[in-house]
Amino acid sequence: MKIFVTGASGYIGGSVAHRLKEQGHHVLGLVRTKEKAAQLEARGIEALLGSLDDAEALRSGAINTDATVNAASSDHFFAVKMLTDALAGSGKALIHTSGSSIVCDDARGDSASEKIFEDETAFTPMAHRAARVEIDRIVRTAGVQRGMRACVVCPTMIYGKGTGLQEVSDQIPKLAKKSQERGVGLHLGKGLNIWSNVFIGDLVDLYMLALEKAPSGSFFFAENGEWPLKSVSESISKSLGFGGRTEAGISTKRLRKWGGGHASRWAPMPESELPMRGNCWVGFRVGQRLTRRCGKACRAASSLSDEVRNDPFPRPCFVPLERSPAARCAIER
């Protein structure tokens, strides 16, 4: 098949594009610059110059391919509208990438959540994630009402070495960098908030299966483990030679001063005060359904804690790991 991938030079999209190419598909990757286009072409991936604000590029990419993977942004309403409009009535597949902070709470590091979220668990998002949830709804509704096979893949915190142009994940390397600057492992508040996580290889497996057979309108959380953020900080501290010492990089009192849990509200705070970007200060966990649906303990060969102990920094990052069948269980049931 010929498959259009947005975010083809990024961490998720690049790894998806690489796997598709390995499987013999023709990949068309959306990139913003000629430099990135040349790098993709060198990997045997056809490049399409454009951005998520480029209506013609999005239409062209979607219409002239057999399936589309939107891995560039979870929050770009215009891009999703253009893709769903272009694919309406085509019967083609659209796999949209969300993010599991849609089920976050306002723990601010001070408590662990006992709530387990399954794919169809009802929830009310915090205000700053309402727009993302609406985008997910638009995609799923298009899969039911607009003549396409559309579904949503919702990764938790991703770890492991990517196989595309961007090999490193977002949260852990940034947290490690800030911890190194401060000489201690950093977390928010007491560090009790729990994050589910997923190995990049398992996540890519899930995209492959979604392209092949996911029911239209479906939604999949992707995870194969969970870890309290204080434990992440302790492992980073040990790996950096700080003896496992940790501290609250941002106090809940200071967070309240800046207006709550959304990263954009921290804009006045110096970057040096932020140990990790994004919505990492909220406690959430999703159900460990990948394991349960396998009927056995099928997880990635390496856990998030193994990755942090091996090397929290990108240089080219983590040791090669064998992929597990975990993500396969999300659809093969």
Image (cartoon, rainbow, N blue to C red):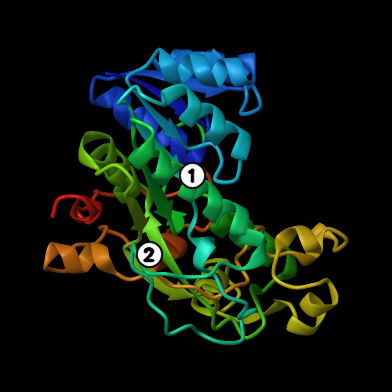
Provide the secondary structure element on which disc 1 rests.
helix
Q: Nearer the viewer, residue 319 or 90?
A: 90
Q: Which mark is residue 246?
A: none
Q: CA distance from mark 2 to mark 1?
A: 37 Å
Q: Quadrant of residue 92?
A: top left
Report crowding for label 2: few under 14, some 14 to 19, many 20 or more residues within 10 A (C-alpha).
Answer: some
User: In the picture shown, does residue 211 fall above or below 245?
Assistant: above
Q: Quadrant of the C terminus?
A: bottom left
Q: Quadrant of the N terminus?
A: top left
User: In the picture shown, does residue 96 fall above or below 312?
Assistant: above
**Residue type marked 1:** Ile
Expressed as whole percent of the image width and height from the top left, the position of residue 241 reads 57, 70
| Nearer to us: label 2 or label 1 | 1
- Please tell me which residue is depicted at 20% across the width and 50% down the height of the picture: 331
Provide the secondary structure element on which disc 2 rests.
helix
Q: Residue 162: in sight, yes or no?
A: no
Provide the residue designation for mark 2. 306
Provide the residue designation for mark 1. 138
Expressed as whole percent of the image width and height from the top left, the position of residue 78 reads 62, 34
Expressed as whole percent of the image width and height from the top left, the position of residue 205 reads 27, 44
Say whether residue 41 is left or right of residue 319.
right
